[in-house]
Amino acid sequence: MTFTLFPDARLTLAREALTGLSVGDALGSRFFVPGGAVAPWPDALPPGPWPWSDDTEMACSVLGVLAAHGRMEPDALALALAAHYDPARRYGAGAVELLELIRAGTPWPVAAAAAFDGQGSYGNGAAMRVAPLGAWHADSVRRAADQARASAEVTHAHPEGIAGAVAVAAAASLAARARLDGDRPEPARLLAAVAGALDPAGEVHRGIRRATALLGRPAVEVAAAVGNGSRITAQDTVPFTLWVAATLLHDYPAAIRACVEAGGDVDTTAAIAGGVVAAYTGVGTPGGVPEGWLAAREPLPAWLTTAA
Ligand code: R7I
Ligand code: MG
């Protein structure tokens, strides 16, 4: 069945994915331990406010562009990312360099292609911000994948950096569609559909296939096998996060806890898994983003509230 969503429905789905992404980012940041140690999940969560990081700041730009243009416009995204860039939000090293080049006038295609000695970035930054775009495209996985590519290329020219974004957007599109249909996909079916949107020769694709073979295993074992994001790359981050989302699609708090207990790049793994899961669960619903967690998250930037 194909259909087209009413614009307000797109915006609601994308906003809820952004809520899941930003709460995951902000709470995950409270548990980030440099050097690879894992902070255990506590009996009581830390008191708010939980500040969000670059994951949320960039995702707000993605949603702002969709709301303003009705589609992903790479030029508008480049301008928004550069305009809202706040170095205190703990951006990736390559992203700092790139956004400063754009602010100084370098065209984004030139800046993105020059990153990392001309191979382009395969950091996890294009994947971490894209779940709202996937939810926006609940009516078409293919469109979600194409638009994710357009959003990723602005900062991540390497095919693996782009594949990470395509995979996460496809997962969020399928999650939002499942919510509209009232039909939760089997984890293996969800991951197979995501893998189908990717180049089978790529490392992100291979990682998702490996993660699929580990469905039913403990999350820490899966993270040990496919990566927990500690390398900050798409290849090392996206397969585990989508395993978490597919496995715990009905249970946002459990998905965030699984990311925290796996260690690594916790703010970003929780942002990715949280964005996809919230596209399915919503906010304040059974299994959804808890209202108390949302209240503890630092408010989203005022400029987004007026834009979307
Ligand atoms: O992808 P990006 O925006 O980083 C996002 C991450 C998230 O965890 C955020 O929470 C924040 O902490 O940063 O930023 P990039 O700097 O483009 O990529 C992230 C990292 O991936 C880089 O700092 C490198 O360590 C690594 N990386 C590469 N290493 C070698 N060669 C990315 N691309 C390459 C590469 O081509
Ligand atoms: Mg971050």
Image (tube, rainbow, N blue to C red):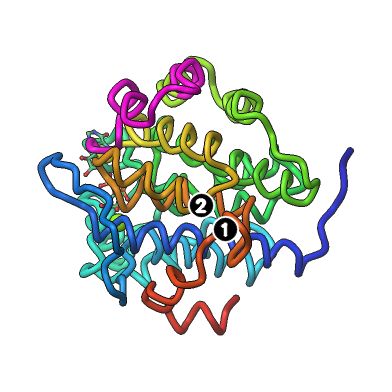
Displayed-image quarter of ligand 1: top left
Question: In this view of the protein, which residue sits in the foreground, 98 or 51?
Answer: 51
In the displayed structure image, the side of residue 72 where residue 224 appears, left or right: left
Rendered location of residue 279, percent (x, y): 61, 53
- Name the residue at 22% across, 61% down: 90
Q: Quadrant of residue 82?
A: bottom left
Q: Earlier in the sequence, mark 2 or mark 1?
A: 2
Q: Which mark is residue 288?
A: 1
Kindly indicate the quadrant of the structure image that contains residue 263.
Answer: top left
Instruction: Return the residue nearer the eye: 126 or 174.
Output: 174
Disc 2 target residue? 252
* Magenta residue span: 208-231
**How far apart are the two marked residues, 2 and 1, measured between alpha carbons?**
5 Å
For this rendering, which residue is in front, 32 or 219? 219
Answer few, some or many: residues within 10 Å of disc 1's Cα (few below 14, many 20 plus, some between 14 and 19).
many
Residue type at numbered disc 2: Tyr
**Rendering coords of residue 307 (x, y %):** 57, 79
Task: Name the residue rendered at 63%, 62% in the picture.
Answer: 285
Q: Cβ(mark 1) to ligand 2 < 8 Å?
A: no
Residue 124, label in figure: none
Binning the other alpha carbons within 10 Å of mark 2 as few (below 14), some (14 to 19) or many (20 upward) gives many
Q: Measuring from the top left, give residue 302's x and y in whole percent.
A: 45, 84
Residue extending farthest to the left is 35
Q: Are marks 2 and 1 in contact (CB under 8 Å)?
A: yes
Q: Amino acid at mark 1?
A: Gly
